Amino acid sequence: MLNLIADEFYKYLDQLDFADPLPPGIDVLNPMKASKEVREITRLFYQKYYSDTRPRTLILGINPGRLGGGSTGIPFTDTKRLKEKCGLELGDLKTHEPSSVFVYEWIDAMGGAATFYQNFLIHSVCPLGFIKGKVNYNYYDDKNLEQAALPLIKHHLTFLTKMNFNREVVYCLGTGKNFTFLSKLNAIEHYFKKVVALEHPRYIMQYKSKLKDEYIRDFMDKLSEVL
């Protein structure tokens, strides 16, 4: 009998840690270690949307950022979207993440959170984030960091493929370095049959915001093949 996704995934996230040495000046961003409130909100989110064994298709970003998943525990979800779109509130913490704005407009266009999360699960290539000072840092921004994070990334992707998720295709948020990294690793490890690139929400909001609706239509068209 398959375990509920909510239980299995939350248990996995709760035990994630990064104990290996990191390059100087870089720290781990692990939302589940931040506070009891974040752990509880994360549990409630997965319980609300994933208390079943229905297969989902994965959408993988880069790694948690400090204003989205790095603060709330929910990928691409700042506190405003957490409350307004998911009906969950994280105490007095207030964060605004432009990527979250795009992601939830896209989710709304596909029927809203309940419908979207019934078919998809959003997470990251690297399940833990990184910061340098007070700035988000991506796992691929430093070759030494990429090598340090590689065992964790492999562990994460192996875990995901052992769950009841769609292995025919994975969607990658980021058409540049994240897509290149995931594609090369997937060619070696064979996690998924196909990796499909989607532009990263942060890039869209920062550089292509006037084309936001066109990107949403493109995302919907590409995701429609698994619905």
Image (cartoon, rainbow, N blue to C red):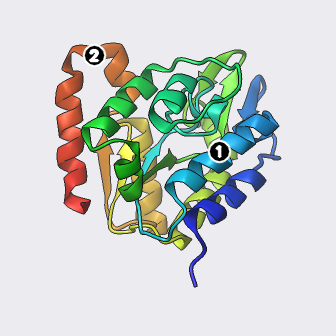
Vertical order, 150 against 161 (above or below): above
Dividing the picture into quarters, in which one does residue 42 lie? top right
* Image location (x, y in percent) of residue 80: 52, 23
Residue type indicated by callout 2: Ser
**SS for callout 1:** helix
| Residue appearing at x 67%, y 53% in the figure | 152
In the image, taking residue 222 as reference, residue 87 lies left or right, namely: right
Say which quarter of the image contains residue 135.
top right
- Mark 1 or 2, nearer chain start: 1
Residue at 72 percent across and 37 percent down: it is 38
Q: On the rendered image, what quadrant is the N terminus found in?
A: bottom right
Q: Which mark is residue 42?
A: 1
168 up-or-down from 198: above or below: below
Residue underneath mark 2 = 209
Image point (71%, 60%), residue name: 11
- Where 160 falls versus 80 (above or below)? below
Residue 158 appears in the picture as rendered: no
The C terminus sits in image quarter: bottom left
Q: Which x, y percent locates residue 111?
A: 28, 44
Left/right of residue 50 with respect to residue 40 in the rendered view: left
Query: Is disc 2 placed on a helix, strand or loop?
Result: helix
* Nearer-the-camera pick, 30 or 72: 72
Task: Report the side of 206 relative to 45 (left or right).
Answer: left
Which of label 1 and label 2 is nearer to you? 1
40 or 180: nearer the viewer: 40
Question: How many numbered tags mark residues here?
Answer: 2
Label 1 crowd (10 A; few <14 / some 14-19 / many >=20): many
Type of residue at label 1? Thr
